Image (cartoon, rainbow, N blue to C red):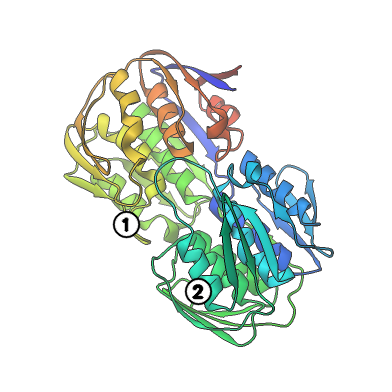
Amino acid sequence: MTAFLIEGGKKLSGHIPIAGNKNSVLPIMAACLLTEETCVLENVPNISDVEVMSKLLKMAGAQVERVGNDTVKISAKNVNPVDFPTDLTESLRASIMLLGAMVARCGKVSMGYPGGDIIGRRPIGTHLQVLEALGAKTKLENDTFQTEAASLKGAEIFLQEASVTATENAVIAACLAKGETTIKRAASEPHVIDLCLFLGKMGANISGIGTNVLKIFGSDKLFGAKYSIRPDHIEVGTFAILGAVTKGKLSMSPVIKDDLDMIILTLQKFGVNLTLKGETLEVSGANLKAVPKVVTDVWPGFPTDLMAPMIVLATQAEGVTLLHDWMYESRMFFVDKLLSMGAKVEIADPHRVLVYGPTKLRGQRLDTPDIRAGIALVIAALAAKGKSRIDKAELIKRGYENIIERLSVLGANIKEAS
């Protein structure tokens, strides 16, 4: 077990580099199973989720090698059907991405249910809908499922929900299916775009990238490719909130403007000072004012992964803000930890909270329920007066590389303890 020890109340200033998109790299790693040739991925974040995915790929017969700090080479020349163990799949939600890749490459897969953060119900029904539409059959037994297909055939698929990972599974599987596949109600988040662009470099024929209708023309063979993972827009939003609540002056790069439109719009409504110069975003301290409502939505709406940090921002804004995440029923439950720090938050129901600000936060002993709530607690502790201890911090390291080192450069008093 890992803990972060933080002494807050300091203005943070300086430059923070943005890591590669966590939600891009994991499905892209899975997609490397589609070819016998070597793929080289650059700007790969050094996080524990990447290590777990690497273990799963190696179990399937792939060779995975980290070269330097941010490059990973994957060679899947020899891939065999495998029973992925529950103890690994339940530690990584993105393990579900192996479903489409393994069925497309090997014709079958057996795996435990995917796990990850406990933020609410995340069923696999849409994933099974996708594979069944392409010709696969799934058998569920206890805590595992087995999916098989003699061959995959293109189909028209209207997703029963606009699931990011189900869209990605559909795209991955369709790349080696016979004929044309049309995916309607497809997710269009930046990480879906990233996956499609990578597959395009492998030789896949995909049209409609960035829209809600994707067309994939199946290929007999895909090839190795070299690809750089796009910067993580969730990190950008997270560190922008950090700069706002600590009233410092931060710059961050690289950023992609088109990935930030809703994030920037929402932060500016709170009064956050933001300046975009090319691939650099600058944030400076501001007098924060509450906005009536922040609601998560499918892309390009406000992302659910920023809701927890946004709640912390609202505790420092003058007035009352309603924050609503309809996607996950347990996203809001971490606010009891903010209450212990002196925040004024009212839980309306599992999906909505009312935040009354501004409040002076005080250091407290806390524990991390999930990745996004964990980084939100780090932000709160850095803004608070006094010392905080955040236990179960290994969850935070699943999604944010070298977070202690990067924050320390900004002047944060943060260190790791066991």
Q: Which residue is mark 1?
A: 297
The quadrant of the rendering that contains the C terminus is: top right
Residue at the (70%, 46%) spot, across then down? 70
Counting other residues with Cα less than 10 Å from the Cα at mark 2, is it few (<14), some (14-19), or many (20 or more)? some
Relative image position of residue 232 (x, y in whole percent): 52, 50
Q: Quadrant of residue 220?
A: bottom right
How many tags in the picture?
2
Question: Which label sits in the foreground, 2 or 1?
Answer: 1
Q: Taking the image as drawn, is residue 186 in sight?
A: yes
Using the image, determine if residue 168 lies above or below residue 272: below
Q: Which residue is mark 2?
A: 209
**Which residue is at a point 32% across and 32% down the rendered structure image?**
312
- Name the residue located 26 percent from the left edge and 35 percent from the top edge: 314
For the residues labelled 2 and 1, the Cα–Cα distance comes to 20 Å
> Furthest residue to the top?
386
Q: Is residue 330 left or right of residue 315?
A: right
307 left or right of 209?
A: left
In this view, 251 is above or below 304: above
Q: Residue at x 48, y 70 (%)?
A: 129
The front one of 73 and 31 is 31
Circle 1 packing at 10 Å, graded few (<14), some (14-19), many (20+), is some
